Image (spheres, rainbow, N blue to C red):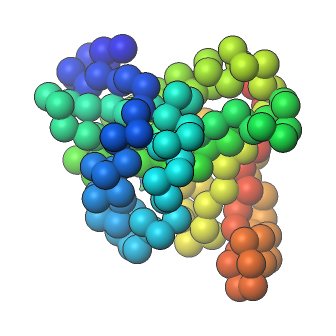
Amino acid sequence: MDLSDGVTVRSATPGDFDPIVAVVDDWWGRPISHNLSRLFLDHFAGTSLVAELDGTLVGFLIGFLSPDQPTHAYVHFVGVNPESRRTGLARHLYELFFDIARAGHRTVVHAITAPVNTRSIAFHSALGFECSAPVADYDGPGVDRVVFTRQL
Ligand SMILES: CC(C)(COP(=O)(O)OP(=O)(O)OC[C@H]1O[C@@H](n2cnc3c(N)ncnc32)[C@H](O)[C@@H]1OP(=O)(O)O)[C@@H](O)C(=O)NCCC(=O)NCCS
């Protein structure tokens, strides 16, 4: 799919792991790459998306259809190059993922973020996600998370 500014979006492949993991700490502005294992691209590339401009990575979404919760889909990571932000690219990636989820008969999309990530909270709110209060110890002792939920 082509966006008006020349950005193209395609399905991810396992080979996208290396270029993605190389940029996430920079794009997030904090160490985050430890949360992105190769398994996500090895096993969920078919439901994940890569955005490129002139062949260079400018955005991605890593998501999957829950194997255990047949009505649920989950977005693990979404990121956009700082230079390409506020152009609607992440919204576009999410809308494509919603289409993938609907095609898989999913009715709910979940994601989580750290309470410090106010940008992510603002973004998910703008896309119609319900945002929980921070859930204490969600991902283990001292690891609080905000939970996002959107009905499709
Ligand atoms: C969060 C992120 C993915 C948003 O990407 P983006 O392409 O800039 O988002 P979009 O342009 O599609 O924004 C859609 C809407 O979300 C909201 N939004 C996005 N970024 C925002 C920000 N920094 N502050 C407030 N609202 C924001 C706005 O309502 C925006 O619409 P508008 O530009 O018309 O006002 C991007 O900032 C990013 O990569 N951040 C670092 C990684 C990260 O935190 N990922 C999320 C957790 S996994």
Residue 152 locus on image (x, y percent): 75, 25
Residue 119 appears in view: no
Residue drawn at 50 percent across, 58 percent down: 37
Residue 45 lies left or right of residue 147; in this view the side is left
- Where 27 falls versus 115 (above or below)? above
Rendered residue at 56%/40% (across/down): 43
Whether residue 137 can be seen here? yes
The residue lying furthest to the bottom in this view is 142
Q: What percent of the width, then of the height, locates residue 46? A: 52, 28
Determine the residue positioned at 40% across, 74% down. Answer: 31
Of the pair 120 and 8, the residue shown nearer to us: 8
Relative horizontal placement of residue 8, taking residue 41 as reference (left or right): left
Query: Residue 4 appears in which quarter of the rendering?
Result: top left
Residue at image point 28% right, 40% down: 58
Q: How many marks?
A: 0
Q: Nearer the viewer, residue 3 or 60?
A: 60
Residue 38 is situated, as x and y percent measured from the top left of the image, at 46, 53
- 42 to the left or right of 136: left
Estimate the x, y position of residue 14 in percent, counting from the top left.
41, 39
Looking at the image, residue 67 lies above or below residue 6: below
